[in-house]
Image: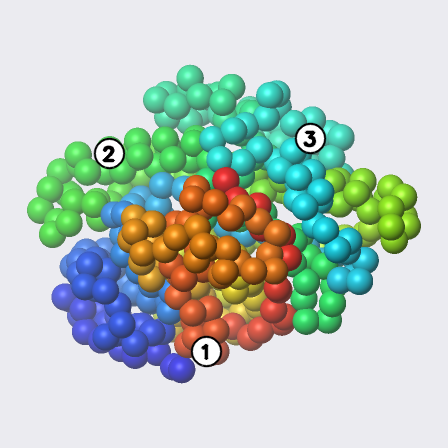
Amino acid sequence: MTYTEVPGARDVPIRMWTDPSQIESQARQQLNNITTLPWLHGLAVMPDVHYGRGATVGSVIAMKDAVCPAAVGVDIGCGVSAVRTSLRADDLPGDLGPLRAKIEAAIPVGYASHSEVVAVDKLPGLSLAAWDSLWERFGDLAPEVHARRERAGVQIGSLGSGNHYVSLDVDESGFVWLQLHSGSRNIGKELAEHHIGVARSLPHNQDLVDRDLAVFVADTPEMEAYRRDLYWAQEYARFNRDVMLALYEQVVRDFFGKSGSKGRKKVWFDQRISCHHNYVSEETYDGVDVLVTRKGAIRAGRGEYGIVPGSMAAGSYIVRGLGNELAFNSASHGAGRKMSRNAAKKRFTVQDLVKQTEGVECRKDAGVVDEIPGAYKNLGQVMRQQEDLVEVVTHLRPLITVKG
């Protein structure tokens, strides 16, 4: 479908890549509230849109000389990374349980972290200079998080909980892919919450229709401090995924390099794809320099690769952007939830989870019922609604999913 344009509170239309009647009332109100911001240059709504804390998930907001930290979200830099391997589906064992166990042993999940900082210099594909630079700048961050230095160190290379996952997938040509979804862990959350609190206290935000949409404005020390911490957290999040993916690759190398029922195999990996979906970018549209916040959305510039995941059963799509500037070169970050976690727990049972994840090696217990596929929107429909935003490269079918 093409977008639908609906009026906002000011003379800035809302471009929606979804049926406006299908957006729940809370999310629609949040979108209307965004249009009241005097700094707004444009607002695009992705097909996975749904209500979110502070600002709507699936919203792409372009502002002139201002940025709203709640429109980034508390998991700064959250995103997805994936890599195609040389393995084929026929190379996989019939029982994927042992491989899943080795993944879970290598990558801490939930609230767990590594016992010590990962030795980055021993992992291929990682820049030690960039790693050193990241930590050299830690002391420049807001003093409120300085006590979290040690924790932030051991959480690099860990998954977290919620909708974060590690998966092993097979594409339409039979190649095996490694994929994972995570962000800036606790340090990103604490930085985000600190700056949201600062923004809410500023005089120019006192008369907003929604104080959660408090902004920082250009040429102020508060904006400078937020952008410094924001960009650091985005870099931390990418490093977190890079380290996890390197650990995951090592697990796969070791697992298939040992003698087994199908013999030893040397595994190689293609170029990695990585994309944030909770972040800020400096871009130009209509000749205007703007700050674009994507909360639950990926950048989809022409030719740029992206990843659009669904649920534990629906799998994911590898996509290429079409560079649609009406959507600020963006696309959805996934299927999007159609019900809250609490609603999912009330509606579905463990038996429902077992049935809906049939054929996937994953947890099938009460602790992940809130992540049941039935709690998410239909990924196929989401992809059809954004055919003018991205083109599909391939679909990934999940065989293993690790959850926090």
| Mark 1, residue position | 384
Residue found at x 33% / y 62%: 338
The colour scheme used here is: rainbow
Q: How packed is label 1: few (under 14 Cα within 10 Å), some, or many (20 or more)?
A: some
14 displayed left or right of 177:
left
Q: Residues at badges 2 and 3 in contact (C-beta under 8 Å)?
A: no
Q: Quadrant of residue 103?
A: top right
Judge whether 108 appears above or below 84 on screen.
above
Kind of element beneath mark 2: helix
Judging depth in this view, the residue of 50 and 216 nearest the camera is 50
165 displayed left or right of 325:
right
Where residue 382 appears, as percent x and y from the top left, is 43, 71
On-image quarter of the N terminus: bottom left
Judging depth in this view, the residue of 174 and 305 nearest the camera is 174
Which is nearer the N-term, disc 2 or disc 3? Answer: 3
Residue found at x 36% / y 55%: 348
Where residue 26 appears, as percent x and y from the top left, is 19, 59
| Mark 2, residue position | 197
Residue farthest front in this picture: 351
Residue farthest top in this picture: 147
Could you give the CA–CA distance between mark 1 and mark 2, rounded to whole angstroms? 38 Å
226 displayed left or right of 306:
left
Evaluate whether residue 59 shows in this view. no
360 displayed left or right of 325:
right
